[in-house]
Amino acid sequence: MRLIPDTKGAADGWRWRKAAASGNTSGADCVEIADQRDFFAVRDSKNASGPMLTFEPDAWTAFRAWLVR
């Protein structure tokens, strides 16, 4: 896992998605995920130009498994 602190322009054009359970309200607290073939990126939906976490595919799978425990 890596933290990318300055994402200005780095994520332009990426397809970000958020959980359907979070709804589409602008005030919803949630994260967004982008699948970038070689890694997965996670960011705060309220701060799209802020820092994001990136996960290699194996780390992403382990992280998701940990979340549902």
Image (spheres, rainbow, N blue to C red):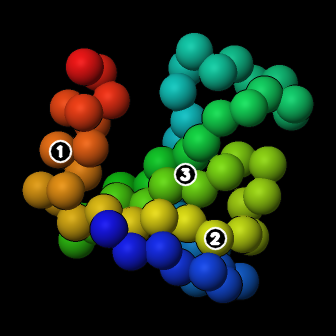
Pointer 1 residue: 61
Residue 23 place in picture, x, y as percent:
69, 18
Q: Which residue is the site of mark 3?
A: 16
Please tell me whether mark 1 sits on a helix, a strand or a loop.
helix
Q: Which quarter of the figure has residue 35?
A: bottom left
The location of residue 33, given as percent across then percent down, is: 48, 49
- Where residue 2 sits, quadrant-wise, is bottom left
Secondary structure under tag 3 reads: strand
| For discs 1 and 3, the disc positioned in front in the rendered view | 1
- What is the spatial separation of the Cα atoms under label 1 and label 3, in whole angstroms? 18 Å
Amino acid type, label 3: Trp
Quadrant position of residue 18: top right
**Vertical order, 58 against 52 (above or below):** above
In terms of sequence position, does the residue under pointer 1 or pointer 2 come before the other? Answer: 2
Camera-side residue of 49 and 16: 49
Query: Relative to residue 32, is residue 51 depicted above or below?
Result: below
Looking at the image, which residue is at 55% across and 51% down?
A: 16
Q: Which mark is residue 51?
A: 2
